[in-house]
Image (cartoon, grey):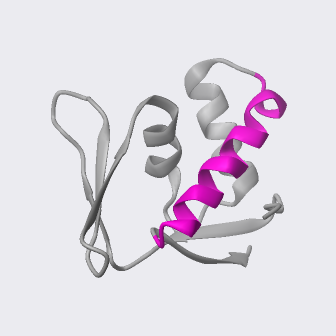
Amino acid sequence: MTWHASEVPHASDEAATFSPSDGSDIILFHDSTRRWHRLPGTAGAIWATIDGRRTVAMITETVAMAYDVDPASIRSDVDTMLDGLLDRQLLVQPSVG
């Protein structure tokens, strides 16, 4: 799926987030599928920005600033990550902001 810059991803109500205090990888649990998902590095950073208010463009810019890279250089990575989260039912269909 091609994510539009104005779309707003929303976490599924069935996705529970576990963020270890040591700052290691974010762990997600999907209640109905009973599956765990580990989000290392930038994947965890992308998940952490999904709050139901930020657009894809805002998520991309936030993660790019955190890693000191050009937003255009990571946009496809953000899209790929969002696709994977949607496929695993960790996101619900996006809305347009």
Residue 83 vertical position relative to residue 26 in the rendered view, above or below = below
Q: Nearer the viewer, residue 2 or 19?
A: 2
Residue at screen point 24% across, 71% down: 34
- In this rendering, the count of numbered labels is 0
Kindly report the secondary structure that dominates the magenta region of the rendered protein.
helix
Asked whether 9 falls inside the magenta stretch, the response is no
Image-based side of 11 in relation to 95, left or right: left
Residue at screen point 57% across, 67% down: 86
Residue 28 position, x and y percent, is 31, 56
Image-based side of 44 in relation to 75, left or right: left
Residue at screen point 18% across, 39% down: 20
Q: Determine which quarter of the picture holds residue 54.
A: bottom right
Q: Nearer the viewer, residue 79 or 84?
A: 84
Q: Determine which quarter of the picture holds residue 1.
A: bottom right
Residue 77 position, x and y percent, is 69, 39
Asked whether 73 falls inside the magenta stretch, the response is yes
Residue at screen point 62% across, 38% down: 62
Most extreme residue toward the top is 68
In this picture, which residue range is highlighted in magenta?
Answer: 70-89
Q: Quadrant of the C terminus?
A: bottom right
Residue 41 vertical position relative to residue 49 in the rendered view, above or below = above
